[in-house]
Image (cartoon, rainbow, N blue to C red):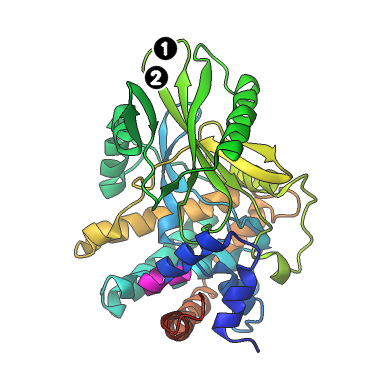
Amino acid sequence: MPNIYERIIAFNKDRLPDMVKLKYKGMAENIYRFYRGTCHLFYEDICKATALPPSPTTWICGDLHLENFGSYKADNREVYFDLNDFDEALLAPCMWEVARMITSIFIAFENLEIEEGEALKAARLFLKIYSAKLAMGKAISIDPRTAGGIVCTFLTKVDKRKQKELLKKKTISKKHKLSLLIDNERLFDLVKPLKNELTGHINEWIKINISGDNNFKVVDCAFRVAGTGSAGLKRYLFLLKSVNTKNKYLFLDMKQAKTSSLQPYVQITQPRWETEADRVIQVQQRMQGISPALLNTIMFKGDSFVVKEMQPTEDRINFELIKDRYRDIYLVIDDMALLTASSQLRSSGRQGSAISDELIAYGQNNQWQEEVLNYSLKYARQVKKDYKQFTVAYNERKFD
């Protein structure tokens, strides 16, 4: 069997080499970033697992972990807290999603130096709330009006954030004109021909897809690096300015969509999608309560991309800040479990996914919970071994 180095190299071989180097650097920082950047390893292994009980087929986001929940502004301009990454989304056993999430709790808590006993409590809480919500059979959404505890505080703060704060952080003024701030960490400059092509392409897209009184146009664009798992994909950030309204700006994110890393390991027949970007947004629209603003697809130079209004990376719960506040952590885990079950209920009965009655029955049967917990705990230990192998190879400069 190929070693960890070979498996990681094989998966990332068709991504942008310079950006993949940044990905490996991030993965070497800590075990949790390694876990986030190696979703493919998880599914290479889980498809062979015999310890996991059978479970209903559902739509899954495919890369569920603690940092793939966050806030965003929807088309109705309200703020929501929900699952927010669907690059790997596919039809699969619902327990694959849950096991990846539970494993992330064990990995993240260890990385935060929280004792294993607390991780076990959090994992059991997630399984309990998840199954109870399935058993109820009714999906929920979380916004500032329905949120409680730290998520309510978090959403209220996000809702009050002004656009000018984001502009101040992401732009620089040159000759009384705003342009994107190139820091060569998150944002990189583009060669002029590509920049001109992208600008023209998005300006045409705007004419069709952004309606209303604000007629926007592109004033700048750059290459964007965001997230660990998606590093190496083509991704661009656009600064748009309203033609009609003074000092009104908008950020647009354009991210390449590739084949889901689950695809080789799922035996379930999948729908035929026009493009990979079409797969991403269609599953996202059926799993989320409300979709992010401007969510759409676009083709550029033969590649499909997901387009949406940029969601700042700060709009995620920072567990580092609350790692000593166990009650707050458990409240967040509770909400994440509710949202996971809700996403599966909301998308039930769609193109091969289990109907709600099947999910309700599965939630009422708690016999599978301990098996999933044990698998995830065991797999978290496997991740530690894989990470050790990775860091050895990284320090030996094999990934160069």
Within 10 Å of disc 1 (Cα), the crowding (few <14, some 14-19, many 20+) is few
Q: Nearer the viewer, residue 400 or 167?
A: 400
Residue 31 among those drawn in magenta: yes
| Residue type for callout 2 | Lys
164 versus 70 height, above or below:
above
Residue 238 among those drawn in magenta: no
Within 10 Å of disc 2 (Cα), the crowding (few <14, some 14-19, many 20+) is some
**Residue on which disc 2 sits:** 248
* Region of the chain picked out in magenta, as a range: 28-35
Q: Quadrant of residue 110?
A: bottom left
Q: Which mark is residue 245?
A: 1
Please state the horizontal and vertical placement of residue 267, each as a whole percent of the image: 76, 69
304 versus 382 height, above or below:
above
Q: CA distance from mark 2 to mark 1?
A: 6 Å
Q: Quadrant of residue 365?
A: bottom right
Secondary structure at badge 1 equals loop
| Residue type for callout 1 | Thr
Residue at coordinates 57% horizontally, 22% vertically from top-left? 210
Residue at coordinates 51% horizontally, 81% vertically from top-left? 398
Quadrant in the picture for the N terminus: bottom right
Please state the horizontal and vertical placement of residue 293, each as a whole percent of the image: 51, 32
117 versus 238 height, above or below:
below
Please state the horizontal and vertical placement of residue 333, each as a whole percent of the image: 36, 59
Secondary structure at badge 2 equals loop
Asked whether disc 2 touches disc 1, contact meaning CB atoms under 8 Å apart, the reply is yes
Q: Nearer the viewer, residue 388 or 139?
A: 388
Q: Is residue 311 left or right of residue 344?
A: left
Residue at coordinates 46% horizontally, 80% vertically from top-left? 397
Please state the horizontal and vertical placement of residue 128, each as a whole percent of the image: 43, 65
Q: Is residue 297 left or right of residue 164?
A: right
